[in-house]
Image: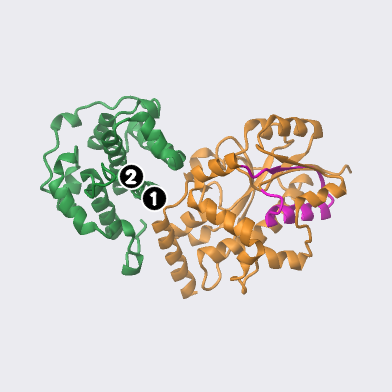
Chain colours: A orange, B green
Amino acid sequence: MNKKKVAILSPNPKSLYSTSVCELLIRNKINIEVIFIKRFTFSRFKDEFSRDGLRLIKKIWEKLILKEKAYNSFANIETILTYRQKENITLNNLKELKFKGIEVYFVEDLNSKFVENKLKEKQVDITVFTGGGIIRKNIIDNSGAGVINCHMGKLPEYRGMDVLEWTLYKKDFNNLGFTVHFMKKGVDTGNILKVFDVKLIKNEEIKSLRVRFEPIMTKNFVETIIGFLNGEIVENPQAEKDGKQYYIMDDYLKKVANQYLQQHTKIK
Amino acid sequence: MVKLLYTSSMTDKLFLKITSHRENLKISQGDILYCPETIKIKLGLNYLPQNNKTISSIEIPKYKYFKTIILIDIIALRANFDIKLENHHYWYKKIYQFFEFHYGRIQYVLKKKYNNKIDRILFIQNIISLLLEYYYETKDSRYLSLSLKLLRIHSLSKIGCFNNKFFGQYSYNIILVHFLIKNF
């Protein structure tokens, strides 16, 4: 049987999520043909700042400056770091994959003509999205079966941003989870491959819950990709009317959502 | 229905001057172009001027795009609030999506639409009132979230940079959002 070919879209070469996904795919005999990494430029900063505001500074601080140290305060839960240790994932930078013969490109825009042409040339089976913003039709249409994403909320109900917080705010504690799905023009409206539940543990907070999601998402994302490529998992369409699109939640409501979560997990 | 936990530890800085906003609204009644009667009664704002009856008879046009919206459309939409009407519902949805999508560059968007700062404030504060009144009727907390985010844009709350006086419609919105958070 021919090895399946994939392309990777990544927001940053040192992303723990991107590097973990890539190493696990390679271990499972998936052929990564090409990796596109979004270059960090001033215009990217400007765009993301206008969307995320001060959250972006926090994100940069945690992901690019603190890196592993950002997980120091989560000693009692499984984080992406402990998961990497357990699975012996050693890839630290996507650039290292150049030595394995994988083409790695830094691009200003993941939707550029260059990426589109490369995808046309590589004829991949799917493209795996590990972050980097909105993906346009020209990329989706040239990604074989499509671009696969892992969304931190259950689809179709919770689309968009801060869906973890929105689920908690609505006290919808039994609907916490994530979804592996294909990307489409509308936000989180593409065909669903698999929906996963995440169960709450004692004394949970939004921060720790987000950290707990990371290794679970990484593991199941890779398993679903492999399942799909092997024909074991099929895609199911979702109706646009079945869900709502959420945006960044106001800080006050986030505090309320966190308080709901703390109360709910205290009783347990 | 989602009931917020409103405890002293959860006080938000938006509500620190709630008493001043009540006072301010009394002296800035002229800034208020419309207030639903039910809200007037619930919030004890009976001193606000009578609503202009002709506003309720204004027909809401078909929604085109944001550039074409003018203040009177928003006032008319507030005065003829009806979520069952497809056209009205479409307006609320589009306005909500527009402001969420452009939240990061909202001041730029408003400056492009209105040169005059008073016009910008009047427009955005009436949009916030519309969003809050939508939340009041539907309990869709996405609208509450957007209202809170817009109310946090300090430059859209006062007319002058060195002027301490808040705009009346801003004070109305603060009083309304405070009431909604405490009671819903």
* Secondary structure type for disc 1: helix
Badge 2 density bin: few <14, some 14–19, many ≥20, Cα 10 Å: few
In-image side of B180 versus B20 (left or right) = right
Badge 1 density bin: few <14, some 14–19, many ≥20, Cα 10 Å: many
* Residue type (three-letter) at the residue carrying disc 2: Ser
Q: Earlier in the sequence, mark 1 or mark 2?
A: 1
Pointer 2 chain: B
* Residue type (three-letter) at the residue carrying disc 1: Ser
Point out the residue furthest to the right here.
Answer: A1
| Nearest to viewer (mark 1 / mark 2) | 2
Specify start and end residues of the magenta stretch as a single range.
Answer: A12-41
Residue occupying the point 27% across, 31% down = B71
Q: Which label number is shown at residue B155?
A: 2
Residue occupying the point 79% across, 61% down = A90
Task: Write down the residue under mark 1.
Answer: B145
In-image side of A268 versus A25 (left or right) = left
Point out the residue furthest to the front here.
Answer: B162
Residue occupying the point 35% across, 65% down = B10
Q: Is residue A21 magenta?
A: yes
Pointer 1 chain: B
Residue A220 x, y percent position in the rendering: 69, 56
